[in-house]
Amino acid sequence: MALQDVLLDELRDMYSAENQLVKALPKLAKGAKDKTLKQLFTEHLEETKGHVIRLREVFEHLGEKPTGQHCNGMEGIVEEGSEALEKDEEGPSFDAGIVGAALRTEHYEIAGYNACISMAKTLGIGEVAGLLKENLDEEMAAAKKITAAAEPILKAAAEQPEDSDPSPKSAKEKYSAKKSRDDEKKAAADVAHRR
Ligand SMILES: [Fe+2]
Ligand SMILES: [Fe+2]
């Protein structure tokens, strides 16, 4: 069945994404300055290990192996998280960057699980949909908790003085700035002709 194949691809992607997060979350927990944030990342790390295990159950149910596809999307998001960890910012503004990165990972997972659940439901595999929904609920709860924990952090960051020289400094930052100008240039004509 064609949809079953698509679902398997998506699930393998999720499996890779979750495994990548098992390695990335401890770095966020270690890097975050705020105690609540640290604790949330540590708690969500344990949930994330549970997500890996639950996905294995899903694959067992489908009689398929979980590996076979690397999630490039999560690799990119995790890479942006490492960039946030390298930033030369003070306490709250440093944490604000980490919050942005963490919320991206959660919402990427939420999108993935929503897609997989719709497919599983269409295929009538309720058991799979149910297991995936358990992961989805924990992702949504995590995103909500991170957003709540971020509130005082963002307020404190708003009080911090601005960077006197925000221009890109490292070679990596300069390359990134150049690429972003390329992105803008390539899209400019299309954006100008918006209907
Ligand atoms: Fe997860
Ligand atoms: Fe998550």
Image (cartoon, helix red, strand yellow):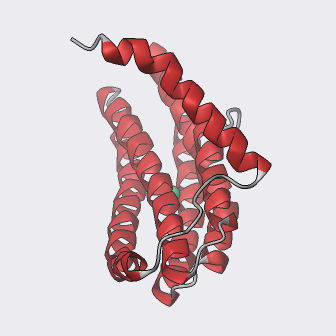
Tell me if 119 is positioned left or right of 83 in this view: left
Q: Quadrant of residue 26?
A: bottom right
Where is residue 128 drawn, in percent x and y? 42, 43
Q: Residue at x 58, y 25 (%)?
A: 182
Q: Is residue 144 above or below residue 193?
A: below
Where is residue 99 drawn, in percent x and y? 47, 67
Residue nearest the viewer, comparing 58 with 22: 22
Q: Quadrant of residue 89?
A: bottom right
Judged from this view, the residue extending furthest toward the bottom is 35
Q: Residue at x 58, y 48 (%)?
A: 77
Judged from this view, the residue extending furthest toward the right is 171
Q: Quadrant of residue 71?
A: top right
Q: Residue at x 66, y 79 (%)?
A: 30
How many marks overall?
0
Q: Is residue 187 above or below residue 32?
A: above
Judged from this view, the residue extending furthest toward the front is 164
Q: Is residue 139 above or below residue 125?
A: below
The answer to whether residue 115 is seen in the rendering is: yes
The answer to whether residue 66 is seen in the rendering is: no
Q: Residue at x 63, y 43 (%)?
A: 76
The quadrant of the picture occupied by the C terminus is top left
Where is residue 154 drawn, in percent x and y? 38, 75
Residue nearest the viewer, comparing 177 with 7: 177
Residue nearest the viewer, comparing 72 with 67: 72
Tell me if 168 is positioned left or right of 192 in this view: right
Residue nearest the viewer, comparing 20 with 56: 20
Where is residue 150 drawn, in percent x and y? 38, 75
